[in-house]
DNA sequence: CCTTGCGCTTTCATATTCGAAAACAAAAAG
DNA sequence: CTTTTTGTTTTCGAATATGAAAGCGCAAGG
C-alpha cells in the first residue's frame, strides 16, 4: 500500500501535542481531517498507532516506534525549507522572526524602516513564547531569553532589556505607597497568570511580594492594557513604558535576572543575505532603542 | 506556505527518471498528476525546479540543490517501511522478493511450499533486473549476481547457478554441428538484445562467437520461448532446461563468470521472523534444486 | 514533406478529501 | 444532578485532486 508522506506531519503533531484538536490547530487543518489522517495511516500500516482516551490521543508502543522516524522526516522537511530560504533571490522572499510579546511589539513598531531597506521582502513576526523551534524551522530568526546549548544555531548576544515599575500617572498620584518600598504590599499589581509564573518578571515580583498580583494576565501586552486602565503597578520594559503616554515610572530602570537576550539564527541561514541583513537591522534597532530610552 | 511532503515523492522520481511519464508509471499515478505536483511545488517554493524539454524534464541548478534532501526524505520513508515490516505480527504480512527473470520463475514455481509453511504471509516476487534497491525498500529480499560493497545490508552467498547449452531435441538432431564446437558459428543462437550485452551469459556467448545471436530477446524467459520454438541454441540454467520437456542439453553444466549469486537482506529486517524464515526457505529450496538438477 | 512516436499539457467528468456543524462522550464545575 | 467544557466522531455539502482522453509540440524516420 502506498501511504501518504504528508500524513506523517499529522502523526507527529498528534503525538507531540497529545490530541487531534491541538495538532489540527497547529497544522491549519480541521480536527476531523487530522483524525482521518491518523486512521488512514493506521489502516495502511496495519498497526494501531494511538490509544484513544476521552481527553486525547496517546501513542501506543508501536506508535512510539514510528515517532523518531516521523521526527527525522520533519527534520529533513525543515532542512529543505531552510534551503528554500537560502536559495530565494537576493533581497526577496519571506523572513520569519519569532519573539516574545514585548519584542514582537517593538519590532512591529520599527519594522517600517526595515521594509524600506528591503522592500521586496515580507516579514512575519511570530508572537509565540516558547513553542518555536529553529531546528523545525518554525522561524528563521528567534529572539530568546535563554541561550540554547545545543543545535546547529548561531548566537548573538544582545544587551538585556531594562525594566522598571510603572503605573498610570493618576494612580501613582493617589497612592503615595507607590513611590516607596511599601508599594509591593500596599498597591495593586498587574502581573502574570500562574501558568506563566516561571517568567523572569513574574519571578522578580513574587520574590518581593507575598500576594499574587491582583490582576493576572496571560499575555505581556495585556499587562500594558491593565496599566493603562489604572489597575495598579507593573514591571514592564522601559522602552515601552517611556513612550507610552500617561504612565509614570516609579522605579529606576533595572536589569533583572533572566532577562538576558539572545538572537538565534540557524547555521544554514547565517550567510543568506536577507537573513543577515535582517539580523543586523534587529541588532542595530534594538540597541539604538535601548540607548534612547535609558537615557 | 504549507507544502505537501508527499509531492517530494514525485519530485524525486521525476528527477531520477528524467520525465513525468516514467515517474508517473513508477508511482502509480497519471502523468497529468505528476506534472501538477511539480508545478505545485514550484509555486510553493517560488523556484523553477525543472527545465522542460521536448523529451522530458531536466533538473535546474536549484532543483539539484533540493534533490539530496528529497533523497533523504525518501530514505527515511524507506526506513519507516522497514520498521513497519519489522513490527508486523509474527508470521503475517507481506514479504517482497526481488529477483531476475530466471530466479523469479524458479521461486514462483516453488512458492507453494513456502505458502504452506507461512499461510498468513503474502509474497510478492518482483521481476526487475537492476532497478530495485533495498535501501529504498523496493523489496525486502533481493537476489543478485553482484555483491554490493556498500549499504546496511546483510549478505548470504548461494552456490552459483550452473548453466548449459540447450536446443530443441529435433533442432539438435538435424544440426550435427550443435554437438561439437562448430556450434558457435554453424548453428543459430537465441540470446540477449544488445541493450543487455553486459549480462554474464551475453558476455559468455560473445566471447565465443563473432556474430550476434540470430534471435535477440529482452527478457530471459523469452529465450526459453525461442528455444521451445526451435529457433536455435541458447545458454540457460540447467534447473530450467532439465525440467523443460523437449529440450536437449548439448554441453556440460558449467559455472560462468559473473553468475555468482547473493541473497541480500537489509540489516533492519534481518531479525524479523517472517523475513528470516523466507530467507532460509529460499536458500534451502535453491540449494536443493541445484543439487537435484546437476545430478 | 508527411507520418509516426513520444512526452507534456489541457479539458472535463469523477473521486477523493476537506471543513463546518451537529452529535456525541466524558470529565469537571456548579 | 445538571451544566459547562473539552475533545473526538459523524454527516453532508463544497472544494480539491485525479485519471482518461484529446490536443499539442517536437524530433526521428520514411
Image (cartoon, coloured by chain):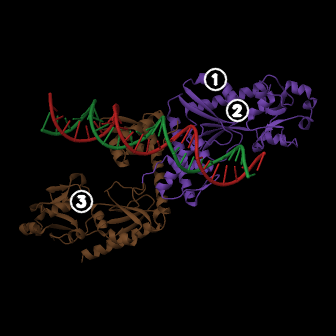
Chain colours: A purple, B brown, C red, D green
User: Which of the image's four quarters has the C terminus of chain B?
Assistant: bottom left
Mark 1 — on which chain does it sit? A
The residue pinned by badge 3 equals B220
A295 vs A35: above or below: above
- Looking at the rendered structure, whether the residues under marks 3 and 1 are on a common chain is answered as no
Q: Position of residue B205 (x, y in %)?
A: 19, 61
Q: Mark number for residue A103?
A: 2
The residue pinned by badge 1 equals A112
Q: Position of residue B110 (x, y in %)?
A: 31, 70
Tell me if B239 is positioned left or right of B98 in this view: left
- CA gap, disc 2 to disc 1? 15 Å
Q: Are the residues flagged by discs 3 and 2 in contact, CB closer than 8 Å? A: no
- Image quadrant where residue B30 sits: top left
Sequence-earlier tag: 2 or 1 = 2
Q: Is residue A219 visible?
A: yes
Q: Nearer the viewer, residue A125 or D18?
A: D18
Q: Nearer the viewer, residue D16 or A175?
A: D16
Q: Are the residues flagged by discs 3 and 1 in contact, CB closer than 8 Å? A: no
Q: Residue at x 39, y 72 (%)?
A: B117
Mark 3 — on which chain does it sit? B
- CA gap, disc 3 to disc 2? 70 Å
- CA gap, disc 3 to disc 1? 71 Å
Answer few, some or many: residues within 10 Å of disc 1's Cα (few below 14, many 20 plus, some between 14 and 19). few
Mark 2 — on which chain does it sit? A
Q: Residue at x 37, y 72 (%)?
A: B116
- Helix, strand, or loop for circle 1? helix
Tell me if B89 is positioned left or right of B240 in this view: right
Amino acid at each position: 500500500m502506498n501511504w501518504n508522506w504528508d500524513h506523517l506531519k499529522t502523526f507527529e503533531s498528534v503525538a507531540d501535542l497529545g490530541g487531534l484538536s491541538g495538532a489540527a490547530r497547529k497544522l491549519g487543518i480541521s480536527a476531523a481531517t487530522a483524525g482521518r489522517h491518523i486512521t488512514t495511516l493506521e489502516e495502511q500500516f496495519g498497526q494501531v498507532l494511538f490509544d484513544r482516551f476521552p481527553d486525547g490521543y496517546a501513542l501506543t508502543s508501536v506508535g512510539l516506534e514510528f515517532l523518531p522516524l516521523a521526527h527525522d522526516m520533519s527534520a529533513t522537511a525543515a532542512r529543505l525549507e531552510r534551503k528554500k530560504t537560502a536559495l530565494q533571490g537576493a533581497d526577496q522572499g519571506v523572513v520569519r522572526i519569532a519573539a516574545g510579546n514585548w519584542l514582537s511589539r517593538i519590532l512591529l513598531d520599527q519594522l517600517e524602516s526595515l521594509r524600506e531597506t528591503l522592500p521586496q521582502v515580507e516579514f512575519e513576526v511570530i508572537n509565540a513564547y516558547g513553542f518555536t523551534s529553529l531546528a523545525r524551522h518554525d522561524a528563521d530568526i528567534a529572539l530568546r531569553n535563554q541561550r540554547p546549548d545545543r543545535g546547529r544555531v548561531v548566537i548573538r548576544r544582545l544587551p538585556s532589556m531594562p525594566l522598571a515599575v510603572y503605573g498610570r500617572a493618576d494612580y501613582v498620584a493617589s497612592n503615595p505607597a507607590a513611590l516607596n518600598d511599601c508599594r509591593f504590599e500596599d498597591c495593586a499589581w498587574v502581573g502574570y497568570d500562574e501558568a506563566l509564573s516561571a517568567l523572569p518578571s513574574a519571578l522578580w515580583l513574587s520574590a518581593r511580594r507575598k500576594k499574587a498580583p491582583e490582576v493576572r494576565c496571560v499575555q505581556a501586552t495585556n499587562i500594558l492594557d491593565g496599566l493603562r486602565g489604572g489597575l495598579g503597578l507593573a514591571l514592564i520594559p522601559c522602552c515601552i513604558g517611556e513612550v507610552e503616554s500617561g504612565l509614570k515610572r516609579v522605579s529606576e530602570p533595572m536589569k533583572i535576572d533572566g532577562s538576558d537576550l539572545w538572537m538565534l539564527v540557524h547555521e544554514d541561514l547565517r550567510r543568506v543575505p536577507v537573513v543577515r541583513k535582517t539580523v543586523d537591522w534587529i541588532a542595530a534597532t534594538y540597541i539604538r532603542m535601548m540607548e534612547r530610552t535609558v537615557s
